[in-house]
Image (cartoon, rainbow, N blue to C red):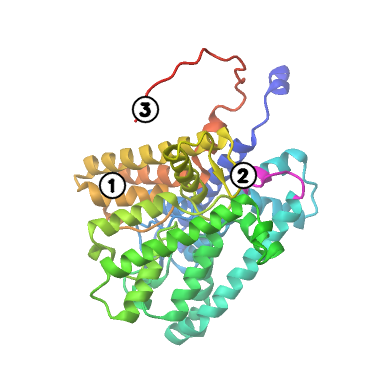
Amino acid sequence: MADLLHRRKPFSSFQIIIFGFAGLIILGTLLLMLPFATRSGNSASFSDAAFTSTSAACVTGLVVQDTAAFWSPFGQFVIMMLIQIGGLGVITVAAAIFMITKRRITLMQRSTMQEAISAPKVGGIVRFTVFIIKAAVIIELCGAALMSPVFIRDFGVLKGIWFSVFHSVSAFCNAGFDLMGARAPFSSLTSYSTEPLINLTIMMLIVIGGIGFLTWDDVIKNRFHLRSYRMQSKVILCTTTILIVLPALYFFFSEFRSLPLNDRVWSSLFQSVTPRTAGFNTVDLRLVSDAGLGVMMVLMLVGGSPGSTAGGMKTTTFAVLFMTALAVFRRKEHTSCFGRRLSDSTLRNAAAIFMLYIVLFLVGAMLISGIEDLPLTPCMFETASAVGTVGLSLGITHELGLLSRLILMALMFFGRVGGLTLIFAAISGTKKNVSLLPEEKITVG
């Protein structure tokens, strides 16, 4: 027995990340099932608590109970902390605790930290983690301070401050949870659709949280010297800009033409930013056309950037696939970007991630549609929102049965942890096959 324990292989970095998020979800579920976590004083059902905990820890925002109307201040605080830990990453927060308590961080732990935040190397990872924690706190406090005048005006001092902090954390972590059920259940930010301060602050928090920690580092170090940026940062900034501007123009000219000009501008901008894994909305999504919903589903699946608080298949995956297609169309042998050639492993990873997300998105939607006897479009919107960790919904989440909720929970967990992380964790320890099989071409297209 002792010999077996001695030979037991240690967990890989990928397995530690998965177990960390699973443990966070379980802890959140238990806390939300406490009687004083609800406004009624009755314990929430396991289904409601588990779904809410998964949605918060995976920074998604899909809810089966209105956050403000159902959960007590304690329950809301638990949800906010799940969002904060899930957004920054369980490993990042654990590393911060290690540093505060002066505990030594081993090489294995540093390697896990590297995988958790998608850093290119282990060297300097502790210093970079400190930078992440400090930057997150400062940005969230600034966001809360900017929104506080509006919320204090509408809800009083104490409640207004709490609303400001909660929504700042939720927006920066790209979670999409809100407390606007104090006005109307499941209304999100529709009552602030033309409030410039709330719109601008929420959008900026979403974008800053979604571009990735390494991109922040580049922006702070190199400022306007764009040539000094990492290629990844250039790709992220360009792709993010395109995915905001083009959908905003589409929404402005196609979806919200009936709105006054001021409302039209704010609604178009907000709805182009929020599907990128944030989950707030300032318009009733049931009034958006099928084409508009299709655009939003694409944005939800793409999501944010690597090493960020956002989910989705990531802007870099989308950019790599797009650049690879361009290279094929132009009959180029290699895919290149900003004067650099992309490796074959990068192209394979991008293709694998894309296939994983598309399959899970479609299969999940078809299963929910069949189980619940619902039209396919709202189910597709729901699964895109779940796997992209977005939180937008056409209003069917709280009506779903247990099996459909379990499907969404699995998709949210997959979307936050990452497809390759789950696969690498499952096949950890398998030996690489160094032999090469004979090559033979196959016609595609």
| Image position, residue 97 (x, y; %) | 71, 54
Q: Is residue 224 left or right of residue 246?
A: right
| Nearer to the camera, 110 or 362 | 362
- Which residue position is annotated with label 2? 340
What's the magenta region?
113-124
Nearest to N terminus: mark 2 or mark 1: 2
Q: In the rendered view of the protein, which quadrant contains the C terminus?
A: top left
Please tell me which residue lies in front, 68 or 445: 445
Question: Dot 3: within a 10 Å radius of its alpha carbon, few (fewer than 14), some, or many (20 or more) residues?
Answer: few
Front residue of 392/70: it is 392
- The reply to whether callout 1 and callout 3 are in contact (CB within 8 Å) is no
Label 2 to label 3: alpha-carbon separation: 27 Å
Residue bearing mark 1: 401
Tag in front: 1 or 3: 3
**Res 35 seen here:** no
Q: Is residue 87 above or below residue 329?
A: below
Dominant secondary-structure state across the stretch colored magenta: loop
Q: Residues within 10 Å of mark 1 (few under 14, many from 20)?
A: few
Does residue 346 show up magenta in the picture?
no
Q: Position of residue 392 (x, y in %)?
A: 36, 59
Label 3 sits on residue:
444
Measured in 3D between alpha carbons, the distance from the residue under mark 1 to the one under mark 3, in whole angstroms, is 41 Å
Q: Nearer the viewer, residue 188 or 307?
A: 307
Considering every residue shown, the one lying at the far bottom of the view is: 153
Question: Quick check: is 115 in the magenta stretch?
Answer: yes
- Relative to residue 368, is residue 124 drawn left or right? right
